[in-house]
Image: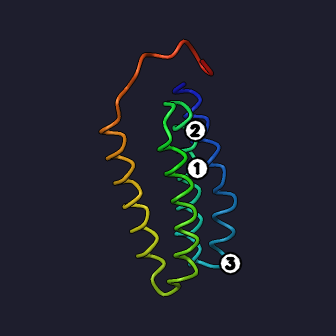
């Protein structure tokens, strides 16, 4: 499973091919692109650990980043990282307080 998560992170890293050209055209795109791209592996993490927090983290992070991008154009470099920090705090709290059940019998079990 660790290999799967690593491959997911590597796949998200390939999005630098989008981030860099977008940055060249509009340097204010960095919080939007990086904030969304590096939230994507949370979907796979949630699947690996069989917990809803992965989907919550990725989806909430993406939606809130896009909303902040449009609502706070002058504060993108503050609002978007702030959103990411809050989503991480929620995710950490949920993961720290979760109960872990029996080990699964394999992937998809």
Q: Residue at x 55, y 46 (%)?
A: 55
Q: Nearer the viewer, mark 2 or mark 3?
A: 2
Residue 100 image offset from top left, x and y in percent: 37, 26
Residue 93 image offset from top left, x and y in percent: 31, 47
Q: Nearer the viewer, mark 1 or mark 3?
A: 1
Q: Residues at badges 2 and 1 in contact (C-beta under 8 Å)? A: yes
CA distance separating discs 2 and 1: 8 Å
In the rendered view, does 17 fall on the left or right side of 96? right
Task: Specify the label residue 15 is tagged with.
Answer: none
Q: Which residue is mark 2?
A: 44
Q: Residues within 10 Å of mark 2 (few under 14, many from 20)?
A: many
Q: Which residue is mark 3?
A: 25
Q: Residues within 10 Å of mark 1 (few under 14, many from 20)?
A: many
Q: Secondary structure at mark 1?
A: loop
Q: Residue at x 58, y 77 (%)?
A: 27
* Quadrant of the rendering where the N terminus is positioned: top right
Q: Nearer the viewer, residue 91 or 52?
A: 52
Residue 71 image offset from top left, x and y in percent: 53, 83
In the rendered view, does 96 fall on the left or right side of 35? left
Q: Nearer the viewer, residue 16 or 58?
A: 58
Q: Earlier in the sequence, mark 2 or mark 3?
A: 3
Q: Secondary structure at mark 3?
A: helix
Residue 70 image offset from top left, x and y in percent: 58, 81
Task: Specify the label residue 40 is tagged with.
Answer: 1
Q: Quadrant of residue 87?
A: bottom left
């Amino acid at each position: 499973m660790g290999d799967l998560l690593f491959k997911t992170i590597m796949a998200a890293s390939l999005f630098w091919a989008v981030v860099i050209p977008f940055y060249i055209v509009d340097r204010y795109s960095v919080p939007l692109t990086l904030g969304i791209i590096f939230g994507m592996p949370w979907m796979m993490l949630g699947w690996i650990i069989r917990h809803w927090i992965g989907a919550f983290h990725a989806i909430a992070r993406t939606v809130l980043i896009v909303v902040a991008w449009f609502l706070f154009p002058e504060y993108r470099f503050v609002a978007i990282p702030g959103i990411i920090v809050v989503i991480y705090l929620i995710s950490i709290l949920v993961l720290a307080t979760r109960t872990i059940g029996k080990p699964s019998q394999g992937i998809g079990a």
